Image (cartoon, helix red, strand yellow):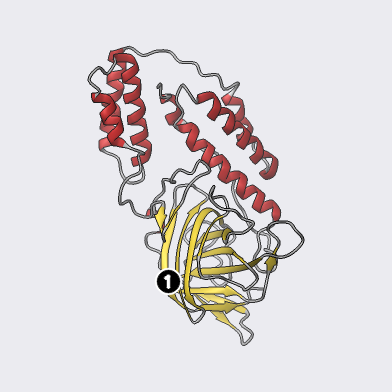
Amino acid sequence: MKKICVLASFFVLFIAANCDNEPLEGDFITEEQFACQQAVAAQIDASEAFGAATSENYTELCNALKVTLEAQIAVCGDSEGQLQGRIDELGDCIFEFEPQTCEEATQVVENSKIDFDEATSETYSERCNAYKAALENQILACGDNNGTIQAIIDDLGNCIQNGETGGSSACGYTLVNVFNQPIQCNGDNTAGLEVANVYMEIGEFFSDEDGDGNDDHSVTTIYITDGTAELNDNSEFVSFTNKTFLLEITLKSAGLDGLTTELHKYFGDPAVNTNVDSVVSGGFFSNANVDGCEETQGEFYCDNRLLIINGGVFISGSPEEYELCFNVLLLDAETCFSRTFTGEFIPIDVF
């Protein structure tokens, strides 16, 4: 199997998510935002798969990536032409390979091994995959009669670091891509954030997920924050204090009884049937430390919010004292945010 080393320089193209428009009642995301969110998630998964392409599956994964890029353009737009530029770079997806000599391949392995030995939690997966690719190239160029090189490759496994902070598994749920593979991510960027309060949008909202004309899911939005919201006597939002982040998650619980105490999996999980399962249908994350948020301390939303592109939310207990565990992946496709919380979900009317 020939690994494509040149793909180490491949980068995923994201669209900026600027959510200045007020959400609909109950903080629903619009159909356009929902479709764009799905398209971005599919493109990220296809990009990750293509980044590990071999000579055998290069054409298949290249064409799959082009399809997701075209879909992203169709639903999200491409005002600067970056996505179309990437499509043009992929060309006709025919793999062309110039063989390395054994000496050249061995030198690449030695350099990749040095990089891998110096990997951090953020770079572990990337450098591990690059090292594996170099070893596979070495087998092609030099042979591996005693199986020593293949044994190293086998020991590297799936290049997901054991015990990493904020990894793909938390709350009894593993974040997976459309290929049902665990997503590599870490929680370093959210390590200092602590949950103080959880608010829950008041009112009853329902949706018809199977399209039969009858509502079948209850829609609930929860707001997770380290701040404290001032509310009036009608539970209407007045202002925020001590807020450095706000995580908004929209949950669709199967049935018409409101929020259910169970695991809600991300709607894009290959194992999820959105017609009958309880799901995380989307959400946003905003941090006061990023541009566009520092001027909105007293307001509910920041001007700049990142989409949640994957996640699981487990809820148990009762309304008086819920037990919450969440693990979500943000739009940069690298940052996981996972925490637990025990306490009341405070009713709030945002608008």
Q: Position of residue 56 (x, y in %)?
A: 47, 22
Q: Is residue 118 left or right of residue 289?
A: left
User: Horizontal and vertical percent for residue 43?
Assistant: 57, 40
Q: Is residue 39 above or below residue 9?
A: below
Of 173 and 197, the residue lying toward us: 173
Q: Quadrant of residue 213?
A: bottom right
Q: Is residue 11 visible?
A: no
Residue 337 appears in the picture as rendered: yes
Tell me the kind of residue under disc 1.
Phe
Q: Residue at x 62, y 44 (%)?
A: 39
Residue located 30% across and 36% down the image: 156
Image point (57%, 25%), residue name: 90
Q: Position of residue 81 (x, y in %)?
A: 64, 35
Please state, as top left, top right, bottom left or bottom right, where the N terminus lies in the image. top left
- Determine which residue is flagged by label 1: 341
Closest to the observer: 346 or 115? 346
Q: Is residue 209 left or right of residue 47?
A: right
- Relative to 103, residue 83 above or below: below
Picture quarter with the C terminus: bottom right
Tell me if mark 1 has few (under 14), some (14-19) or many (20+) residues whose alpha carbon lies within 10 angstroms of its own: some
